[in-house]
Image: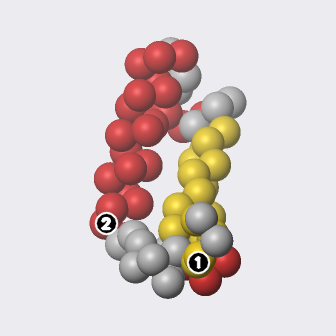
Amino acid sequence: MPLVHIQLLEGRTEEQKRIAIQKVTAALNEAFNAPPETIRIWFTDIPKTDFGIGGKTAKELGR
């Protein structure tokens, strides 16, 4: 059973995540011949204030 954990800076829409789930599922099905019903995908949204780049938060950098 493939398990995929995707970490993102907050701000993606439900629709974007839905599309990503469909495409990642299709890719794993093709690459590993894994039945779609066995593929698990989950997202962790990271607040922009909790992610640093070069000494500044992603929020400070406008990311």
**Crowding at mark 1 (Cα within 10 Å: few <14, some 14-19, many 20+):** some
User: Is residue 11 visible to us here?
Assistant: no
State the CA–CA distance, disc 1 to disc 2.
26 Å
Q: Nearer the viewer, residue 2 or 10?
A: 10
Q: Which sits earlier in the primary sequence, circle 1 or circle 2?
A: 2
Seen in the image, is 15 located left or right of residue 54? left
The x, y position of residue 30, in whole percent, is 42, 19
Q: Quadrant of the C terminus?
A: bottom left
Q: Residue at x 43, y 38 (%)?
A: 24
Label 2 crowd (10 A; few <14 / some 14-19 / many >=20): few
| Residue 8, placed above or below residue 31 | below
Q: Nearer the viewer, residue 53 or 26?
A: 53
Task: Inspect the image, locate mark 1, and give the three-letter code of the amino acid beneath it.
Answer: Thr
Give amino acid for label 2: Glu
The answer to which image quadrant residue 11 occupies is bottom left
Q: Which mark is residue 57?
A: 1
Image quarter where the N terminus lies is top right
Describe the colour scheme in one phrase.
secondary structure
The answer to whether any part of residue 26 appears in the image is yes
**Which residue does the image show at 52% across and 74% down from the upper left?**
58
- Residue under label 2, please give it: 15
Q: Secondary structure at mark 2?
A: helix
- Residue at (39, 31) in percent of width and height: 26
Q: Quadrant of residue 52?
A: bottom right
On screen, residue 34 above or below 52:
above
Label disc, if present, on residue 13 of the rendered structure: none
Q: Position of residue 16 (x, y in %)?
A: 33, 62
